[in-house]
Image (tube, rainbow, N blue to C red):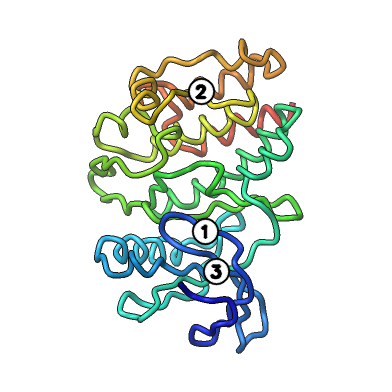
Amino acid sequence: MIDVGQVLDKYELLERVGQGGMAVVYRGLDRSLRRHVAVKVLHRHLAEHPEARDRFEREAHAVAKLHHENILEIFAYSGRDSAESYIVTEFIDGATLKQAITDHQPRFAEVGALIVAQICRALGHAHGHGVLHRDVKPENVMIRSDGVVKLTDFGISQMLDAQRMTVTGQLLGSPAYMSPEHVLGQPLDFRTDVFATGIVLYQLTVGKLPFEGKNPHEILKRIADCKFVDPRQANPRIGNQLGKIILRAMARSPDDRYPVIGAMLADLEAFLAG
């Protein structure tokens, strides 16, 4: 275990601010530039596994090509052969969207639409560079103290083939936010991120997830069937316009969804403008 106070190259680790299955995140100090950064360090027991290092490297390479206000900016990557495998990014003074909605569930549907519109902008930029996120969920969204939304954790993202524009679905990601085609092991494209974004919008506006179960298997079966309570019935305050956006994003067939995330964004912006 890396200890607070250690220095990795020029990055001094000041405090632990988060932990996941892949890595521990520290608030650090870049001693050269005298600025605070986030240092995401791969768990040592995973560093011995090539698959884990590949996933970590994939995240570094995917985010390095993305420069957008709503995407966490990467500053440095240790390299796969470093003794400690880590990624250095901007430090976000704020909380994850999951923590935010746990503390204060949005009272107004418009707040959820505002947050998801920023997620859509981030995904639009990533998709424009051929990057499919594959794990859009509240844990991977940060809300900065000034209200700016940051999409994070591209660890299981995929670079899509420019000709096929699909990737064979591996069951990696969070069950509650998977698309039906992901669950069924079918080829994925950008519309699987549209579906996950629809689930996040549903959760923010209804106050609960559309697909729930006693265990992951039950959740996956419900996603494959794509049966859920209409958001307008679950929360009448959502209204018809926003309800239609959620339902189109969460259509079972990718062909019935928004063809691109930008189309969903346009409808959200029209709703917010109204």
Specify few, some or many for label 1: CA neighbours under 10 Å numbering under 14, 14-19, or 20 or more: few
Residue where numbered disc 2 is placed: 210
Q: Is residue 221 above or below residue 37?
A: above
Q: x and y percent of residue 53 in the render? A: 31, 66
Q: Is residue 56 above or below residue 117?
A: below
Q: Secondary structure at mark 3?
A: strand
Q: Quadrant of the C terminus?
A: top right
Look at the numbered discs 2 and 3 and tell me whether their residues touch, using CB distance below 8 Å.
Answer: no
Q: Nearer the viewer, residue 203 or 181?
A: 203
Mark sitting earlier along the chain (1/3): 1
| Image depth: mark 1 or mark 3 in front | 1
Q: Amino acid at mark 3?
A: Thr
Residue where numbered disc 3 is placed: 89
Give the number of the disc on residue 19: 1
| Image depth: mark 2 or mark 3 in front | 2
Q: Amino acid at mark 1?
A: Gln
Q: Nearer the viewer, residue 162 or 21?
A: 21
Mark sitting earlier along the chain (2/1): 1
Task: Please identify the quarter of the rendering in which residue 145 is found.
Answer: bottom right
Q: Quadrant of the N terminus?
A: bottom left
Q: Secondary structure at mark 1?
A: strand
Q: Is residue 233 above or below residue 167?
A: above
Q: Nearer the viewer, residue 56 or 120?
A: 56
Look at the numbered discs 1 and 3 and tell me whether their residues touch, using CB distance below 8 Å.
Answer: no
Q: Is residue 131 above or below residue 136?
A: below
Q: Residue at x 48, y 38 (%)?
A: 261
| Image depth: mark 2 or mark 1 in front | 1
Q: Residue at x 75, y 27 (%)?
A: 108
Q: x and y percent of residue 265 in the render? A: 57, 36
Separation of residues labelled 1 and 3 (CA atoms): 15 Å
Q: x and y percent of residue 23 in the render? A: 45, 62
